[in-house]
Amino acid sequence: SRIITHLTFFCMEVKNLFDTTAFNEISERINKLTPDTERNWGKMSVSQMLAHCKEAFKVPLSDKPMPRMFIGRLLGWMAKSKLYNDKPWGKNLPTSPNFLIKDERNFEEEKKQLLELINSFYSKGAGNVGKYPHPFFGQLNSNQWGISMWKHLDHHLKQFGV
């Protein structure tokens, strides 16, 4: 029992946001959030977290390439598999400065816009998103995009207990 609990903590079921079941589950979890939902770790409010997740979706949905970060060119390849492997992301990970949300946001508007971006990602489907390399991690295939975007949302939804 103790070993199973330990293994469960270090492994997770990795889902792909292009999968209908995973898409529906993520949407339902986001809809459970309220403006008063408290974080379990970190500094962001729930509306800031929604805005942060919106910024992440702008990467695979972009019609223009984003400049590669120098540090990403040097080190991105070493961390790339953490985006889509079956290990949960750690708490309080560093984030790119353009993904930091410091001002307070309107919860309902951020939630609505994030759900629209998730729907756009899902609707476009594998092979029609992520045309350009990730600014830090470089080229990702469709499966890696689907898993990494699900994993990012799952990480932040767990941060807020849903």
Image (cartoon, rainbow, N blue to C red):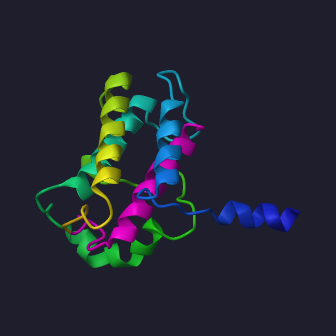
- Asked which quadrant contains residue 117, the reply is top left
Task: Please state the total of marks drawn on the protein image.
Answer: 0
Q: Residue at x 54, y 57 (%)?
A: 90
Residue 151 covered by magenta stretch: yes
Residue 7 lies, with reference to residue 54, above or below; the image says below
Q: Residue at x 34, y 78 (%)?
A: 77
Residue 14 lies, with reference to residue 141, above or below; the image says above
In the image, which residues are magenta?
133-162
> Horizontally, is 128 left or right of 52 in the view?
left
Residue 115 lies, with reference to residue 104, above or below; the image says below
Residue 82 covered by magenta stretch: no
- Asked which quadrant contains residue 80, the reply is bottom left
Q: Which of the pair 7/96 is nearer the observer?
A: 7
Q: Which residue is drawn at 48% across and 36% down?
A: 30
- Residue 92 in view, yes or no: no
> Horizontally, is 28 left or right of 52 in the view?
right
From this viewpoint, which residue is outermost toward the right? 1
The image position of residue 33, as x and y in percent, is 51, 29
* Magenta stretch, main secondary structure class: helix
The image position of residue 22, as x and y in percent, is 51, 53
The image position of residue 42, as x and y in percent, is 50, 41
Indicate the quadrant containing the N terminus: top left, top right, bottom left or bottom right: bottom right
> Horizontally, is 1 left or right of 120 in the view?
right
Q: Which residue is drawn at 39% across and 70% down?
A: 143
The image position of residue 120, as x and y in percent, is 28, 47
From this viewpoint, which residue is outermost toward the left? 64
Indicate the quadrant containing the C terminus: top left, top right, bottom left or bottom right: top right
